[in-house]
């Protein structure tokens, strides 16, 4: 492995961190962080998001590189539109969380994991999968312009993915702090959670509008 390729991998790691903090990624995962009961749960939500994101980037990206194909613009934008739908769904479910759940204290044996923790991790992986699928086309173009072989591409995508995991781990930990601090103050926690849900919903609607009207996706669908 020559020095130039190592430099490319280092760049891929940094770009992965930068990619993790894109607004739609942070907003989506913040809806899970807002409902975390422990800081470690919020942090792990970021890790599992990164795992899901890397999995689809790797699988779809390598398949496209092997067949030397690209995702048509219409389909690439449609996958991006799916992200908008997901953001609205996450926002609405976060907004209505306090209406569905009776707030009360649970006492568990030390070391016992609450079922909601497993659910949040699965949810994080699913969010990451959607984001990875939506970004796979751009990832292929970036990889093709950066490295020469499929083997090098595979390594590059994995390093990029590790960068996104580190980036999201850091930011979901930061995001989780206000919610953990306010956990025992029901009204404050409810307000923060609902603000998070509202941001996700509004941003999701804007995201879909921008793709559909601003970038002409709806016209593509009708052609």
Image: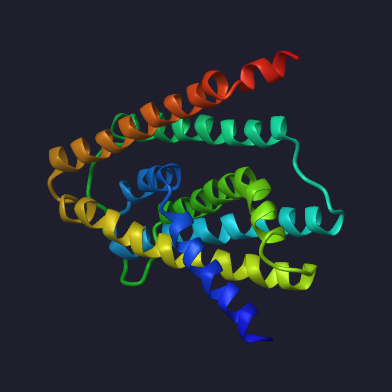
Does residue 126 appear left or right of residue 58 in this picture? left
Q: Position of residue 43 (x, y in %)?
A: 37, 62
Q: Residue at x 54, y 36 (%)?
A: 83
Q: Closest to the observer: 145 or 128?
A: 145
Q: Residue at x 64, y 56 (%)?
A: 142
Does residue 217 appear left or right of residue 149 in this picture? left
Q: Is residue 82 above or below residue 165?
A: above
Q: Judge whether residue 100 can be spotted in this image.
A: no
Q: Closest to the observer: 68 or 37?
A: 68
Numbered circles on residues, count: 0
As drawn, which residue projects farthest toward the right?
A: 67
Please identify the quadrant where the C terminus is shown. top right
Q: Position of residue 56 (x, y in %)?
A: 66, 54
Q: Is residue 147 above or below residue 219?
A: below
As drawn, which residue projects farthest toward the top?
A: 222
Please identify the quadrant where the N terminus is shown. bottom right
Q: Is residue 5 above or below residue 180?
A: below
Q: Residue at x 52, y 21 (%)?
A: 214
Q: Residue at x 45, y 62 (%)?
A: 17
Does residue 175 appear left or right of residue 119 in this picture? left
Q: Quadrant of residue 104?
A: top left
Q: Position of residue 24 (x, y in %)?
A: 44, 42
Q: Closest to the observer: 12 or 75?
A: 12
Q: Quadrant of residue 161?
A: bottom right
Q: Position of residue 90 (x, y in %)?
A: 44, 36
């Amino acid at each position: 492995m020559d020095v130039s390729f190592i430099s490319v991998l280092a760049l891929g790691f940094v770009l992965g961190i930068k990619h993790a903090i894109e607004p739609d990624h942070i907003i989506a995962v913040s809806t899970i962080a807002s409902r975390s009961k422990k800081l470690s749960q919020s942090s792990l939500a970021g890790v599992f998001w990164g795992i899901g994101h890397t999995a689809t980037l790797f699988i779809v990206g390598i398949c496209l590189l092997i067949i030397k194909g690209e995702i048509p613009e219409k389909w690439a934008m449609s996958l991006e539109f799916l992200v908008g739908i997901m953001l609205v769904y996450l926002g609405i479910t976060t907004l209505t969380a306090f209406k569905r759940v009776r707030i009360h204290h649970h006492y568990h044996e030390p070391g016992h994991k609450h079922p909601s923790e497993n659910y949040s991790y699965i949810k994080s992986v699913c969010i990451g999968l959607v984001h990875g699928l939506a970004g796979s086309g751009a990832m292929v173009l970036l990889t093709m312009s950066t490295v020469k072989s499929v083997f090098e591409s595979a390594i590059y995508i994995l390093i990029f993915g590790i960068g996104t995991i580190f980036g999201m781990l850091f930011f979901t930990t930061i995001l989780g702090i206000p919610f953990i601090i306010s956990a025992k103050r029901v009204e404050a926690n409810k307000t923060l959670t609902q603000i998070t849900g509202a941001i996700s919903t509004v941003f999701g609607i804007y995201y879909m509008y921008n793709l559909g009207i601003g970038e002409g996706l709806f016209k593509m669908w009708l052609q």
